Amino acid sequence: MFFRMIKGAFVRQWKKMLMIALTIALGASLATAMLNVMMDVEDKVNQELKTYGANITVSPKNASILQDLYDVEGQAEAAYLKESELGKIKTIFWANNIVDFAPFLETDVALNGEAGVKLVGTWFNHHLSLPTGEELDAGVTSLRSWWDIAEGEWLDEQAHEDDAVMVGAAIAARLGLHAGDTVTLTGGSGERTARVAGVFDAGGDEDDAVYAPLHMAQALADAEGLIGSIEVSALTTPDNELAIKAAQDPGSLSISQYELWYCTAYVSSICYQIMEAIPDCVASAVRQVADSEGEILEKTKLLMVLITVLSLIGSALGITNLVTASVMERSQEMGLMKAVGAHSRSISGLVLTEIIITAIVGGAIGYGAGFGFAQVIGHSVFGSAIEMKLMVVPIVAVLVILVSLAGSVPAIRSLLKLDPAEVLHGH
Amino acid sequence: MSLLEVKNISKVYPGLKALDNVSLTVNEGEWVAIMGPSGSGKSTMMNIIGCMDKPTSGEVLLDGVDIAKESNKNLTNIRRDKIGLIFQQFHLVNYLTAVENVMVAQYYHSLPDEKEAMEALGRVGLAERAKHLPSQLSGGEQQRVCVARALINHPQLVLADEPTGNLDETNENIVLDLFRQLHREGTTLIVVTHDPEVAEAAQRTIVLEHGRLVKEIINENFVS
């Protein structure tokens, strides 16, 4: 009979039950959407921030020492890293957080006879097949995504444009170069002819340089297999006290602190792991970028947490009100059940079962809708999907059940105190 | 043998004395009507006899148990086991069918038995309407479902509060015929009414005014 009564309530009062379920669904959808977005916002904002360039630079140890001592960049030219070791960057513990990287080798060349032109050898969209099986396109095409291609287009390494270069806007203007022109580059160890694939406007010193495929710069500088530095773009966790302490001296950490630091994607721990992977190098954070990223992330997360908490409070109040109202509406029915011999426990059991079933249905609908809302937010704000976080399912489930039950407690308490004579006779 | 003995009960609400030193005895198998104008204390009397309220003072012995001294939990059990209630407003659960409404009383009493509930509906002439919802039944039919629900657990006492108050003459006669049948079968009936015709159908009528028992009328022409 218990289930017949439950079934009767749902089948014959489906409109009323649906209304309660939809209110619960609305609350659950808000909670689901905000929790999913909140949990994914760090990755999303991080990805967005990565379009603004690298946050780690890797340079040869000798060059770094000289640079630190004298703060003179030119001294670094004497030291090199090996190109063959580049792939090791993607073998560190936080390899998945390395979203992009590019090697750089600078040399001076004569361009169409004009001496003293800076030539930067690098990867553009270099395809890597890593030993781990991962396929990756790395290089300045994505690492310098803010460059404005004034003429032509990005140099496409994968289309085998080995004999092409990209020319900075300033030097192109000075020498009257345009996309499609052919230029002659003369270095210390030979001469190469190259086509101008594009003219870029970076809005800085880079506009005075010519960017060429790495092997071309290596050939002209007589530095086969060598690179001057690496820029790395990594998804990082904002620094905290532990990260700052570790960045100063990892040796000062206790074992547990070390493990925590090593297994967290702090920029300092990623730098440390790169230095472990590539011998004789110094990896350092581009502090300004890393700090700004951390600050933006923290503020965005705080904002999302506040919005989420407010949404949850709003949902909870909505659910509570409707559940209370719907239970109180049934006071006469409950009074009758008491009159025919029902004890408080039986009545509470009946009402709670109905509420829990409604909450489960509403919660399921709300979760689906909420995940949809999250995708709308993801696509409209970040231009990509929000990842489904499994952790949100139990959180929303517990939340919906708790809020629904909490919402029904005052109503059930009044029902239990209900005097059947009062509701049945109006006395 | 008396089933109900009400001894000097009073019920006082703040600023109102609803019942004032009322005594009454109802024997097993007797049909008693309680009459009186509005505000005379009829419903208060019914609530106390029906274990839904307690007197401020006095004793109410139902089948030998002083229900005035029982806890609310025990009163619920006594009501469930010994009393069948019929209301003026019917008070059927609107999302349950007629037979399910009868089974609700079975469910809280012991075990629901659909066959027995169908028989109870058959007894009040509603077997054909068993699967209908209250909203699909007329007022008379709803009251008959209410009667079937009151009888399903074979109570010692049937308490009816203005059972014909919302019915037309035809349905009033159907309900009174049902009461006559119950009386013939030995059921003790207490009917609260302000309708003299309904009161005249009973063996004995108690008249209340301003919370006091002012008159007791034996129906010499009573025909069961």
Image (cartoon, rainbow, N blue to C red):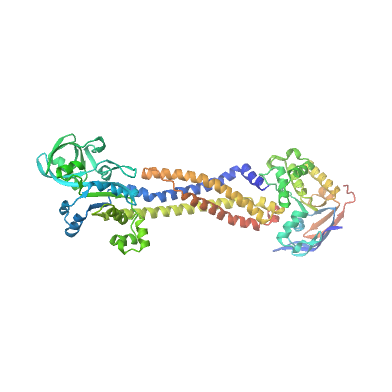
- Please identify the residue farthest to the right as the structure is shown: B220
- Please identify the residue farthest to the bottom as the structure is shown: B57
Q: Nearer the viewer, residue A333 or A122?
A: A122
**Image quarter of the C terminus of chain A:** bottom right
Residue at 51% from the left image edge and 53% from the top image edge = A399
The answer to whether residue A427 of the structure is visible from this angle is no
- Image x and y of residue A54, in percent: 27, 49
- Image x and y of residue B113, in percent: 74, 45
Where is residue A305, by image quadrant?
Answer: bottom left
Instruction: Please state if A364 lies on the left or on the right of A44 as rendered.
Output: right
The answer to whether residue A162 of the structure is visible from this angle is yes
> Taking A185 as reference, is A349 above or below it?
below
Q: Nearer the viewer, residue B192 or A341?
A: A341
Where is residue B16, by image quadrant?
Answer: bottom right
> Taking A32 as reference, is B73 above or below it?
below
Residue at 33% from the left image edge and 49% from the top image edge = A95
Instruction: Please state if B205 lies on the left or on the right of A200 as rendered.
Output: right
- Image x and y of residue B14, in percent: 69, 64
The count of marks equals: 0
> Taking A258 as reference, is B134 above or below it?
above
- Please identify the residue farthest to the top as the structure is shown: A180
Residue at 16% from the left image edge and 55% from the top image edge = A72
- Image x and y of residue B68, in percent: 76, 63
